[in-house]
Amino acid sequence: MTVLFAVVIALAAVSSLGVVLSRQTIYSALSLVLTVSMLAVLFLLLNAQFLFAVQLIIYAGAVMVLFVFIVALLSPDSEDRPTLDLRAVIGILGIVVVTSLVFVAARNGITYNTNGFHGVAVGSANNPYHAFSFPQDAVNNAGNVQTVAGQLFTNYLLPFEITSMLLLIAAIGAVYLTRRSSQ
Amino acid sequence: MLNPNLFPYLLALSAFLFTVGATGVLIRRNPIVVFMCIELMLNAANVALVAYGRFLNSEEGQIFAFMVIVVAAAEVVVGLALITQIFRLGRELDVDDLSEMKE
């Protein structure tokens, strides 16, 4: 299990570097496919089966096909390898500093330890997240997809409906942007 | 039961993916690659949300990550429509050249 986590995390990190460093746009797109697929596996390992399916269908399927389609349609020139200018130095410094800071902070239990947030046990009465915490028994009984759906269509129904409006607006916007202008 | 020592590594992966994506937005000039880097940053947020949800025994992280995926899909649709429109105007695909709105 831990070995699987290590392999998936390493592959996701390396292929994300491939997105930024590839000279050909199509190689960036293929690296992003690998990153997204590895994150889908990570979701499966983290007991999020519904998100695993959504990630594969929407990201690795629809979004990446759209990207590859646009790359094939526009066939952009290959870029020069990014030079080590000020922006690149700031970026590399940011990667190193932020990643190590987050790792050290999480390691020392700044945000999470084995008892939950700030040492307050999950599910205890004085935990501010008590009302929303989901007991593992419920997930084991009903399955992940059913518990997610139960929350999504009760407590989170309004945000869910708003996202459907957002998708409709995006579709109309894309049609409006790509129409041929009639002069 | 999942090993709690894994949690820092998951958060570090999330931070790494986010900063790599931000660096890509800074240094790449092709708008298609810039959009891919934005996708990378949104995925990094999803990793953190799902990891927190898993380790706090809560489904809310997954629901929020689902919303993020929907927003990312909408963003890709509009962004790629803009890129094709820029291409149709006969402009070179280079974000450093597309700066008329600054003036």
Image: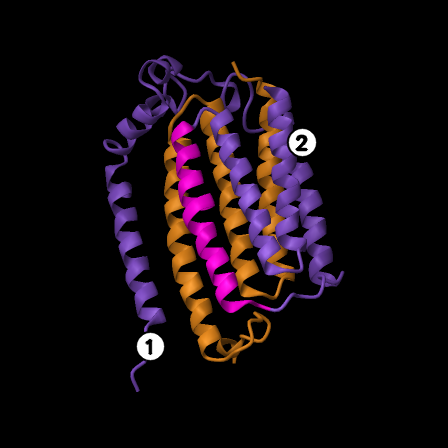
Chain colours: A purple, B orange
Q: Is residue B101 left or right of residue B15?
A: left
Q: Secondary structure at mark 2?
A: helix
Chief secondary structure of the magenta portion: helix
Residue A152 lies, in percent from the top left, at: 28, 33
Magenta segment, which residues?
Answer: A49-76
N-terminal-most mark, 2 or 1: 2
Which chain letter goes with mark 2?
Answer: A
Q: Quadrant of residue B64?
A: top left
In the displayed structure, A130 sits above or below A178; it is above
Instruction: Residue lying at the far right in this picture: please name it.
Output: A84
- Residue A59 x %, y %: 45, 45
Please identify the quadrant where the N terminus of chain A is shown: top right
Residue A172 seen in render: yes
Does dot 1 land on a helix, a strand or a loop?
A: loop
| Residue drawn at 31 percent across, 69 percent down | A176
Q: Would you place residue B70 above or below residue A79 in this image?
A: above
In-image side of A133 versus A73 (left or right): left
In the rendered image, the residue lying farthest to the bottom is: A183
Please give the name of the residue rendered at 51% of the width and 58% of the height, measured from the top-left corner.
B35
Q: Nearer the viewer, residue B48 or A55?
A: A55
- Judging by the rendered image, the residue that carries numbered circle 2 is A104
- Which residue is at 43% across, 62% downward? B79
Residue at mark 1: A180
The kind of residue tagged 1 is Arg
Amino acid type for the residue under numbered disc 2: Val
Checking the image for residue A38, the label placed there is none
Q: Is residue A77 above or below residue B16?
A: below
CA neighbours of label 2 inside 10 A, class few (<14), some (14 to 19), many (20+):
some
Q: Quadrant of residue A91?
A: bottom right
The answer to whether residue A106 shows anywhere in this view is no
Residue A170's place in the image compared with A162, above or below, is below
Residue appearing at x 63%, y 60% in the figure: A24
